[in-house]
Structures are given as C-alpha cells and as structure tokens.
Image (cartoon, grey):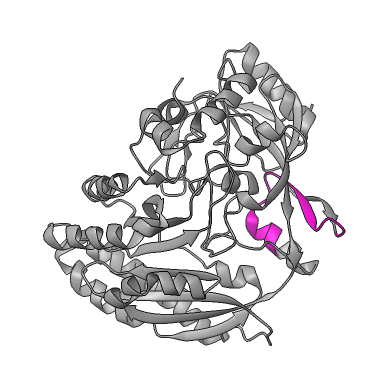
Amino acid sequence: MTDTYARTTSTWRNWAGNVTARPARVASPASVDELAEVLRRASEDGLTVKPVGTGHSFTATAATDGVLIRPDLLTGIRDIDRSAMTVTVEAGTPLKRLNAALAREGLSLTNMGDIMEQTVAGATSTGTHGTGRDSASIAAQIRALELVTADGTVLRCSADENPDVFAAARIGLGALGVVTAVTFAVEPVFLLTAREEPMTFDRVTADFGQLVAENEHFEFYWFPHTGNCNTKRNNRSAGPADPPGRISGWIEDELLSNGVFQVACSVGRVLPGAIPSLARISSRALSARTYTDIPYKVFTSPRRVRFVEMEYALPREAAVEALRELKAMVERSPLRISFPVEVRTAPADDIALSTASGRESAYIAVHLYRGTPYQAYFTAVERIMTAHEGRPHWGKIHTRDSAYLAGAYPRFGEFTAVRDRLDPDRLFANDYLRRVLGD
C-alpha cells in the first residue's frame, strides 16, 4: 500500500469554522483496496472512521477523533455510458470538476445546488439540493453507487442490486460505509434562461404556488427588516446562449453579491444597529437581469462570504405560512439579521432519509455571518419549522435528535435497520450520528 496513512496532530475545520476535530490519523487511500485496508486497521486499533469532503456541512457529520479519510486521490470519471445516459465518477471528485468534464462531453446533470465546491460523496450523502418543480436533489439523480462497508466488503447497489441499501445509501450520512463511486443519470447538455427580478415579500408569498407551478426552477431570497425579495426563475431555453457580460456579471456576482456584501456583513457584526439600513440598501442593489447559459453556470454561483446556516424542509403547502411567521418573529424581536432568507422547492422522492422523502417540499434556509452569535435566531426559527413538521437538512445546523427524526421520517426505521446490518459495531459512528440516528 502507498503511504496513505499518517499520524496527525493537526486540527480539521469545516468551511464555516464552526466545527473542529482532532483525528488520531488521516488516510488518503488511492484505491478501493487501500480504503478497505484502512478500515481493517482502524477496526483492529479500536478507532472510528469518518470520510470528509470539502467541509461545507455546518454539522459535525464528518468529525472524528479516530481516522479521518480524505478522498483527494479518489477522483475522476470512471465511465460514461451514452446508451444508458449515465456517468460513473469517483466519490472524491469535486462537483465543479464533474460539471466542467460533463460539459466538455456535451452532457449535464438535470439539477444541482447553488454551489459546486463539494465532493460528489459529500454532497449526495448529506442531501444537497437545488430548487425544482419536477427535478429533485443531486442524490435523486443517482442510479448506482459503490460502498465499502465496515468489514471491507465492496458493495454495489442500485434499484436492481442490493435495493434496500440503495434506498438508504444515496443519502447515507456516512453512517453505512464509505462511498467510493457514484453513477448519475445525465442528459445532453441544454440551455437555461435565468430571469432574476426584485419582487415584494407580499407579492411573492401571495403568488408562491403559481410561481412554482409556472417555472421549472423557482427560488427567492427575502431580506429581513425589509419587504423586499429577489426572485430567480430558471427555465429551459432553445437558445441562443446569452451569458452575462464579463463586466456586468462581475458587478452582480462578485462586486455586489460578494465584495460589497462582505463589507456590509463586517459592518453589521460590529454595529448591529446598522443592519436594517444596510438590508434596505442591499435589497435594492441587485437589479433585474436575464441571461441564458449551460446549466451549471446558471444553477451555481460563487459564495465567498462565509456564514453558518440552518435549513428546514417543510410540506410545500406550509411554506408561506411558516415564512410569514418567521418575518413576524424577526419584526417583533431585537434580532438584527444581515443575511437574506432563501426559499426553494423540490418534488417528492423515494430516498429513505431525503428531506423530500415521500412529500413535495419547500426549503427555508436562514444564515448568519460567520462569527456572529446565531443561537437565538436559529432557535426561534427552529421552533417555527418544527411546528410545521419540518425536517432539518442533515448538513446544516439544527438541534433535532433521533426521537424527533423517527417521527418526521416514515422510513427512519428502514434506514437504521440497514445501518445495524452494515455497521453493527459502529465503525462509522460519531457524536452527531449518535444524536440523529440513535445508537
């Protein structure tokens, strides 16, 4: 085996800096066989194991004091099957590399989230999603996956092969084994026209159902302390491509959405009383625009301002009421919220622990600038979300435990039964999984 195993005294931190861990060892296996050997040695030494991606989860789902597995060497495309219209990719491949490689081949995922820094396995295992009327999360586009289990077995699963594992492992939280490869459904690359437009809070909530029904992908951001929103509608287009101009795109996506916003957040952290005024300015700074490009250039955008986040999936019909309650809560409280609230949707899917499992869903995500105390705001938001049967995003801050989650997910017991079979000795356990899945 190559030198993939090293003792470490360094501290691992996630992207937001709110989660840290000090693993006993770090491994970077270059093959499935090397990974199986890492798992065997960890088990012999009484150490737990957790794979880690790029750290874009805000929960401690990847934290460990045992063996931390970095997937840096498990990258690249294994196979493109144009007859089946699938691509099989190594689990450590960053989504941005996958998207660019697919585009070169004239292919694309059907839907994706709004950033592409995560690894394939990290994004799918925690339920990363975008917004869609008919097309669901990244995990819902999986057609097969390869999983190395606690005893070193290489398990291939799909709807036809080990279907019970497949139903659970597409969003597996790192609790069932280490995902080493994922096969996605793909389609010929297409064009999307994005229409971004300011809209009042009252109008967007009154017309929410219609906006979702009339657009393939609809989302909006509400700016707390204002009645202002920014909406985005993405729909397939016959073309021609008409991407944002280099200067105008830089002004919108870098200068305003990142540079000026970073300054506003920094000022707001020092002077919270200035936040409502800054919010009114920010909510009016982004103007309406329309552009057409290939999918990943429309779905995703740079996120350089670091933050912490909580997100809940609600039954779609509960979203507007919950959002109005959230707005009323902010207005009557002393809270000062510098980040907009994001609202997206997803169709129902058939993955056991998907936040959209078995029901059409709407997502409400709240954020605060990194370093800002978030507990009071997130606690108040969580109270509203749980009153509407909310399911927390597995990779974002929440306080729910297995007792709550077992009631929120009809197929929760199905997942834990697969876990008991594949990892009876809890090689892949950590404190977060003990809280959300029980032990």
Residue occupying the point 15% across, 63% down: 331
Residue occupying the point 78% across, 68% down: 104
- Comparing 410 with 233, the one in front is 410
Is residue 282 at least partly visible in the picture? no
Q: Along the horizontal axis of the image, is 232 left or right of 397?
A: right
As drawn, 238 above or below 214 = below
x and y, in percent, of residue 406 in the image? 42, 31
As drawn, 63 above or below 427 = below
- Comparing 349 with 151, the one in front is 349
- Comparing 143 with 76, the one in front is 143
Instruction: Identify the magenta region.
Output: 82-99
Q: Is residue 74 magenta?
A: no
x and y, in percent, of residue 308 in the image? 37, 51
Q: Which residue lies furthest to the right in this view?
A: 83
Residue occupying the point 73% across, 22% down: 152
State how many labels appear. 0
x and y, in percent, of residue 234 in the image? 54, 75
x and y, in percent, of residue 373 in the image? 24, 48
Asked which quadrant contains residue 25, the reply is top right
Is residue 184 at least partly visible in the picture? yes
As drawn, 5 above or below 180 = above
Rendered-image quadrant of the N terminus: top right
